[in-house]
Image (spheres, grey):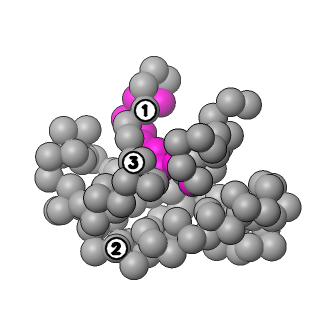
C-alpha cells in the first residue's frame, strides 16, 4: 500500500522506534511499527481488513469519515487513525480490494 502521513510528526512516530518509544509504552511502540510494516506490505485494504487482529473499523461522531486500526487488539486503547481521500465509507468496506493508498492521520489513545 502507498502510505502518506498527515504531517512529519506523525510520520516520525510511525517509522522510528526511538520516536515511538518516547510517546508510547514500549509494547505499543513495537506493535505500532509492526502494524505500519504490515500496511506497507499489503497489496490493498482488503488484505488488511482480513487480518482481524487489527480490527479495522469506521469511526463515529466528530471523526465520521475516518477509520481506525487497533494497535494491540481490542483491549488496548491505542489506535491508528487513517483516512482515504475521496473514497466513501461504502466503498471502503464493499470494494476494499481497489484501495491501495492510505493516509495515516494520527496515533491516539482512545481514552485520553
Residue 82 seen in this snapshot: no
Residues drawn in magenta: 63-71
- Classify mark 1: helix, strand or loop: loop
State which quarter of the image contains the C terminus: top right
Whether 87 is drawn above or below 35: the answer is above
Q: Is residue 91 left or right of residue 7?
A: left
Dot 3, how many residues are within 10 Å of its Cα: few (below 14), some (14-19), or many (20+)?
many
- Indicate the position of residue 102 as horizontal and vertical percent values: 39, 60
- Residue furthest toward the bottom? 41
- In percent of width and height, residue 63 lies at 47, 30
Q: Which residue lies under the disc numbered 3?
A: 56
Q: Residue at x 39, y 78 (%)?
A: 41
Q: Is residue 44 left or right of residue 35?
A: left
Asked if residue 66 lies in the magenta stretch, the reply is yes
x and y, in percent, of residue 77 in the image: 64, 40
Q: Which residue is mark 1?
A: 59
- Taking depth in this image into account, of 42 and 62 the one nearest to the observer is 42
Q: CA distance from mark 1 to mark 3?
A: 10 Å
Q: Indicate which disc residue 42 carries.
A: 2
In percent of the image, x 52 and y 65: which residue is there? 35
> Which quadrant of the figure has residue 90?
top left
Per the image, label 2 sits on a secondary structure element best described as loop
- The answer to whether 97 appears left or right of 20 in the picture is left
**Label 2 crowd bin: few (<14), some (14–19), many (20+), radius 10 Å:** some
Q: Quadrant of residue 60?
A: top left
From mark 2 to mark 1, how far is it between C-alphas? 22 Å
Residue 2 point in image, percent of width and height: 38, 72
Amino acid at each position: 500500500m502507498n502510505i502518506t502521513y498527515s504531517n512529519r510528526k506523525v510520520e516520525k512516530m510511525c517509522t522510528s522506534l526511538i520516536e515511538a518509544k518516547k510517546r508510547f509504552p514500549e509494547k505499543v511502540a513495537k506493535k505500532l511499527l509492526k502494524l505500519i510494516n504490515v500496511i506497507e506490505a499489503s497489496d490493498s485494504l482488503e488484505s488488511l481488513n482480513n487480518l482481524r487482529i487489527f480490527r479495522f473499523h469506521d469511526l463515529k461522531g466528530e471523526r465520521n469519515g475516518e477509520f481506525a486500526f487497533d494497535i494491540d487488539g481490542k483491549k488496548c486503547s491505542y489506535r491508528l487513525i487513517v483516512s482515504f481521500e475521496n473514497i466513501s465509507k461504502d466503498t471502503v468496506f464493499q470494494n476494499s480490494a481497489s484501495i491501495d493508498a492510505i493516509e495515516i492521520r494520527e496515533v491516539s489513545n482512545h481514552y485520553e
